[in-house]
Image (tube, rainbow, N blue to C red):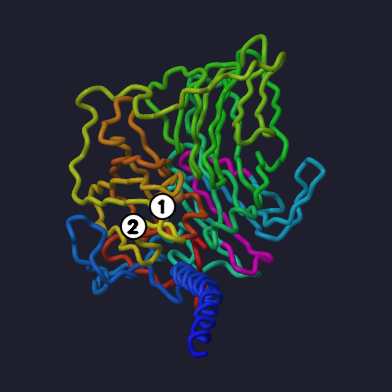
């Protein structure tokens, strides 16, 4: 009797044991998931001194950011007085139902009723004054000027340089646009949601003196994924432009989505004139070459409209969004098998004019992934020790992609120079970027000059990755903030 009961209970145990084990395992995974996700939504964190261990510095400088009596607040660092020409704008953030130009509509969040918001065109040296008004975005909004090295208080990062602007409130940004080039703006409150829902736009800084080529056709093209619908300049159809044979075209491509876009130019040879707003030195002609533009990056392409046919710029991942310029026949699609790389493109500066600076400080950032989160050096968001620097230092940063997809790494407030890829020094033009596209296995070495005191985010611009933890700080010694990140303040810059 006892024996047969034992058999039965064993059978029962077997029948129930496996499902119980599976349920247990699932519960553990759910717990780990929520524990890891919780890291992205802390209750309250001050990003000026959020980490109590050593800094990420390989030289292990102790963190002195707490005590300093001569501390300066980020929000007190403003643009210097200038009598530069003033360009004034107002951007109103609001919930809007957009029509996409293909008969479809989409619930979006917009600036001045459109996504992308208005294209801001200013001239090098202008003082740009933008008043952001929030009509009805409940989570609040901000404006971050991607690639423009603004003073800390104007950087538009919720919980670092300001509070998110609540419905009915406003915030005025003031900065001098002193570097010509192609840039963009987006909300840095819940950026992965708000950029996806449409709170972004272009800002182009034109050079003060036009070059020799005055007959230039200046075309801006900003790509976004509006809640997973790819759009080009707000349209779900392509861009078709008139243009005359012989016209020189500067095509400003901005990738405001999260994935890498690979562009081909059919019907003309072209040059990569600028990356992230910075002109390359003696860029050579390219043909049948695919140009990978990482999330957040900008590429300015230069080409001449031929006599007999159109030029078509396209990306395979944006099949229905070609840019067509000129007259006549559509050119055959180029193979575009070869991939553009800046490592040997253009010309170096004359010998003796250009030397790699000695670094005062070095960091290594390993971009990767753990179970449910994206990581830098194995940690996520505010758990990542900041890069602590002092004003005036030359800072060397190794950026390593250890997997989890493409990681276009963006550093706020600074332009950095790329010196090597996978240990091989660059042999072409100097390359200055604010966003560096890395793919698995890449190791880049960059330097920046710590010339913009503040508290600066450094994060992957696949904003999904940033929201899952791939976001850290570059903090100057002696700079504080009175704002906090977390559920208490509601400031969640990268959620
Ligand atoms: Cu990433």
Residue 288: percent from left, percent from top: 52, 19
Callout count: 2
SS class of the residue under badge 2? strand
In this rendering, position of residue 135 left or right of residue 220: right
C-alpha gap between disc 1 and disc 2: 8 Å
Range shown magenta: 119-141
Is the shortest distance between ligand 1 and the CB of mark 2 under 8 Å? no
Indicate the position of residue 65 as horizontal and vertical percent values. 26, 68
Task: Tell me if residue 308 comes above or below residue 141 in the rendering.
Answer: above
Against 166, residue 335 (above or below) is: above
Is disc 1 surrounded by few (<14), some (14 to 19) or many (20+) residues within 10 Å? many
Mark carried by residue 412: 1
In-front residue for pair 37/57: 37
Circle on res. 474? 2
Residue pictured at 33% horizontal, 57% vertical? 474
Classify residue 313 by image quadrant: top right
Residue 159, position in %: x, y?
46, 68
* Residue depicted at 21% across the width and 51% down the height: 361
Contact between marks 1 and 2 (CB within 8 A): the answer is yes
Question: Mark 1 vs mark 2: which is more N-terminal?
Answer: 1
Depth order, front residue of 42/296 = 42
420 left or right, relative to 298: left
Classed neighbour count for the residue bearing mark 2: other residues with Cα under 10 Å, few (<14), some (14–19), many (≥20): many
Residue 222, above or below 55: above
């Amino acid at each position: 009797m006892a024996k047969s009961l034992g058999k039965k209970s064993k059978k029962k145990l077997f029948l129930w044991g496996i499902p119980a084990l599976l349920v247990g395992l699932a519960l553990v995974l759910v717990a780990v998931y929520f524990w890891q996700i919780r890291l992205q939504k802390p209750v309250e964190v001050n990003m000026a001194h959020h980490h109590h261990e050593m800094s990420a510095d390989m030289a292990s400088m102790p963190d002195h950011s707490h005590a300093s009596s001569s501390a300066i607040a980020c929000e007190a660092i403003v643009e210097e007085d200038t009598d530069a020409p003033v360009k004034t704008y107002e951007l109103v953030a609001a919930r809007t139902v957009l029509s996409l130009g293909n008969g479809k509509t989409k619930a979006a969040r917009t600036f001045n009723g459109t996504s992308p918001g208005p294209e801001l065109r200013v001239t090098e040296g202008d003082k740009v004054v933008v008043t952001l008004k929030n009509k009805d975005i409940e989570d609040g909004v901000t404006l971050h000027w991607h690639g423009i090295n603004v003073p800390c208080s104007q950087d538009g990062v919720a919980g670092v340089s300001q509070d998110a602007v609540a419905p009915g409130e406003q915030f005025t940004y003031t900065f001098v646009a002193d570097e010509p080039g192609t840039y963009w703006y987006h909300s840095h409150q819940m950026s992965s949601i708000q950029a996806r829902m449409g709170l972004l736009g272009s800002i182009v800084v034109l050079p003060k003196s036009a070059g020799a080529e005055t007959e230039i056709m200046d075309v801006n093209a900003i790509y976004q994924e509006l809640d997973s619908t790819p759009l080009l300049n707000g349209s779900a159809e392509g861009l078709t432009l008139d243009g005359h044979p012989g016209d020189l075209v500067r095509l400003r491509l901005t990738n405001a989505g999260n994935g890498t876009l690979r562009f081909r130019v059919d019907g003309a040879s072209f040059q990569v004139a600028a990356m992230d707003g910075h002109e390359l030195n003696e860029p050579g002609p390219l043909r049948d070459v695919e140009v990978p533009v990482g999330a957040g990056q900008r590429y300015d392409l230069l080409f001449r409209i031929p006599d007999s046919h159109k030029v078509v710029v396209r990306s395979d991942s944006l099949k229905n969004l070609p840019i067509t310029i000129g007259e006549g026949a559509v050119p055959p699609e180029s193979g575009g098998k070869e991939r553009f790389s800046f490592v040997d493109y253009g010309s170096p500066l004359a010998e003796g004019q250009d030397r790699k600076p000695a670094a005062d400080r070095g960091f290594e950032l390993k971009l990767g992934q753990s179970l449910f989160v994206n990581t830098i050096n194995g940690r996520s968001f505010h758990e990542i020790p900041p890069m602590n620097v002092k004003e005036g230092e030359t800072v060397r940063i190794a950026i390593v992609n250890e997997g989890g997809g493409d990681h276009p790494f963006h550093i706020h407030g600074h332009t950095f120079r790329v010196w090597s890829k996978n240990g091989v020094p660059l042999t072409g033009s100097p390359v200055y970027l604010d966003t560096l596209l890395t793919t698995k296995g890449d190791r880049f070495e960059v330097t920046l000059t710590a010339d913009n005191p503040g508290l600066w985010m450094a994060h992957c611009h696949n904003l999904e990755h940033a929201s899952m933890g791939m976001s850290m700080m570059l903090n100057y010694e002696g700079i504080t903030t009175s704002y906090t990140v977390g559920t208490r303040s509601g400031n969640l810059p990268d959620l």
